[in-house]
Image (cartoon, grey):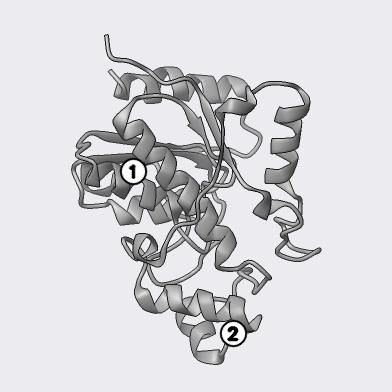
């Protein structure tokens, strides 16, 4: 039987006080609140906590274009965005605001996911990265409040480590369009998304199978735990066998 590592958690203090703005849908300090709650309830041995590294430019450009990463760095340094970068990379547009850590925060999220994937490639186990999951990011632009697609970068890290049969399961309310698009033609990666139907980005229809490498389960608004368990039992679990 293969050895399995104890569960671990990767977090960072960069999320504390970092905000997209008071009126933004992501104004709630979700990550720092989650980390504080886990600590207060004693759910995790402090020895299993890992401080997230920050992804390097070289690591980020494994998926994203150099021009886009440079534009994020410029936006953080100047706290503004020029018209060309706004139009080309959607920084400061479409609900993707310029904020204090516009490069360093997503780079930290990506660094945490990359570290988790490299650790699990060596030894199987469960690692939670509450700052990750920015699945809408595209190679050359921000999308859906996501500046860096840490999920795509993590999958690429697994592929680079030699894994060739990857199942990506996405249960966000929105379809994981950025990840599905990234691996649309890669038979080594199967993407599965359970999301709310008729909701932005309005992709991920039930008949969208991405050339045979994806499954999408759009659920109606108000879907219950029973609905989610049915998808788990009849759709997700069979794919793992």
Q: Nearer the viewer, mark 2 or mark 1?
A: 2
77 over 208 or under it: above or below: below
Residue beneath label 2, please? 81
Can residue 152 be seen in this snapshot? Answer: yes
For residue 238, side relative to residue 112 (left or right): left
Circle 2 sits in a helix, a strand or a loop, which is it?
Answer: loop
Q: Quadrant of the C terminus?
A: top left
Front position in the image: 84 or 200: 84
Displayed quadrant of residue 74: bottom right
Dividing the picture into quadrants, the one containing residue 88 is: bottom left
Q: Is residue 184 left or right of residue 146?
A: left
Q: How busy is the neighbourhood of tag 2: few (under 14 within 10 Å), some, or many (20 plus)?
A: many
Q: Residue at x 58, y 19 (%)?
A: 226
Residue where numbered disc 1 is placed: 207
Residue nearer the viewer, 112 or 167: 112
Residue situated furthest top in the rendering: 1
Give the farthest residue toward the right: 22
- Residue 84 vs 190, above or below: the answer is below
Could you tell me which residue is drawn at 63 percent across and 66 percent down? 101
SS class, disc 1:
loop
Position of the N terminus, as image quadrant, is top left
Look at the image and tell me whether residue 205 can be seen. no
Give the vertical position of 20 relative to 213 (above or below).
below
């Amino acid at each position: 039987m293969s050895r399995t590592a104890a569960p671990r958690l990767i977090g960072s203090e960069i999320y504390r006080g970092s905000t997209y703005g008071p009126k933004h849908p992501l104004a709630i300090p979700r990550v720092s609140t989650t980390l504080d709650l886990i600590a207060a309830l004693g759910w995790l041995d402090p020895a299993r906590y890992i401080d997230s590294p920050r992804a390097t430019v070289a690591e980020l450009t494994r998926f994203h274009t150099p021009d886009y990463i440079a534009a994020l760095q410029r936006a953080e340094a100047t706290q503004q965005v020029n018209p060309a970068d706004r139009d080309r990379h959607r920084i400061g547009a479409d609900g993707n605001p310029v904020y204090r850590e516009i490069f360093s925060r997503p780079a930290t999220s990506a660094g945490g996911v990359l570290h988790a994937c490299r650790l699990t490639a060596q030894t199987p186990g469960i690692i939670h990265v509450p700052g990750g999951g920015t699945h809408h990011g595209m190679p050359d632009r921000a999308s859906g409040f996501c500046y860096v697609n840490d999920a795509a970068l993590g999958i690429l890290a697994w592929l680079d480590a030699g894994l060739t049969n990857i199942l990506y399961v996405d249960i966000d309310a929105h379809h994981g369009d950025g990840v599905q698009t990234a691996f649309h033609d890669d038979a080594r990666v199967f993407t599965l998304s359970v999301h709310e139907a008729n909701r932005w980005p309005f992709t991920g229809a039930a008949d969208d199978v991405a050339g045979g490498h994806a499954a999408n389960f759009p659920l109606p608004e108000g879907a219950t735990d029973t609905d989610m368990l049915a998808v788990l039992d009849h759709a997700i679990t069979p794919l793992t066998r």
